[in-house]
Image (spheres, rainbow, N blue to C red):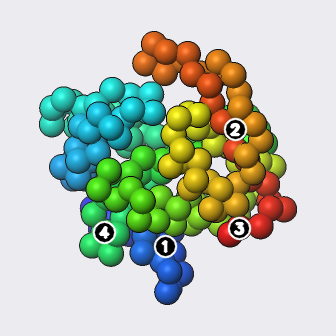
Amino acid sequence: MDSQESTQPIMSSSPPAGRVSLRLMTLSDVDDYMVWATDPKVARFCTWEPCTSRDEAIKYITDRVLTHPWLRAICLEDNRPIGYILIMAVDDIRKEIGYVLARKYWGKGFATEAVRLLTSEIFKEFPEIERVEALVDVDNVGSQRVLEKVGFTREGVMRKFLCIKGRVRDTVMFSFLPSDTLK
């Protein structure tokens, strides 16, 4: 993959509200990636532990990010990543989304814009799916708020649903259907 192709936006928000774009991540994003991947507060609700070295970050990007079927960097106007968003297959008719953002960008609407952007395009890119899901730790109120602002429906709490970092956690299930209204 040439570097020109890999930095072109995959999706971008429409003006005037659009401050984020989504593009493929590359190995050259390692230093920006380390901003959020080394932060224990960012990793708190994630399945991964904070990154401890640049070599570890390079290995993670090489082995997990670049090989992921649908993972995009969340970028601001300067095209530098401030986080990422991904789509994972659940089964033939469902996809799950996940996202992570550097802490200094929390509470500024960037995650909401990225989720809105992905949600506005996902049923076009994957016309076979009937449902998009997001699973959020019950204590991750900020992420729950992001999904609600985009128009996801909070379906309920899945008790003792996931084991994250050795702890069994309650998880809130959110969904968005093709017939739902994007906010």
Q: Residue under circle 3?
A: 182
Disc with the residue nearer the chain's start (1 vs 4)? 1
Separation of marks 1 and 3 at Cα, in angstroms: 16 Å
Which residue is disc 2 drawn over? 173
Q: Nearer the viewer, residue 127 or 133?
A: 133
Q: CA distance from mark 1 to mark 4?
A: 11 Å
Q: Secondary structure at mark 4?
A: loop
Question: Residue 149, how many percent across, how many down?
Answer: 62, 62
Residue 176 horizontal/vertical position (percent):
74, 53
Which of pointers 1 and 2 indicates the residue nearer the eye?
Answer: 2
In the rendered structure, the answer to whether residue 165 lies left or right of residue 154 reads left
Q: Which residue is mark 1?
A: 12
Residue 180 visible, this orientation: yes
Q: Secondary structure at mark 2?
A: strand
The amino acid on which the numbered mark 3 sits, given as a three-letter code, is Leu
Farthest residue in the bottom direction? Answer: 16
Between the C-alphas of marks 3 and 4, the distance is 25 Å
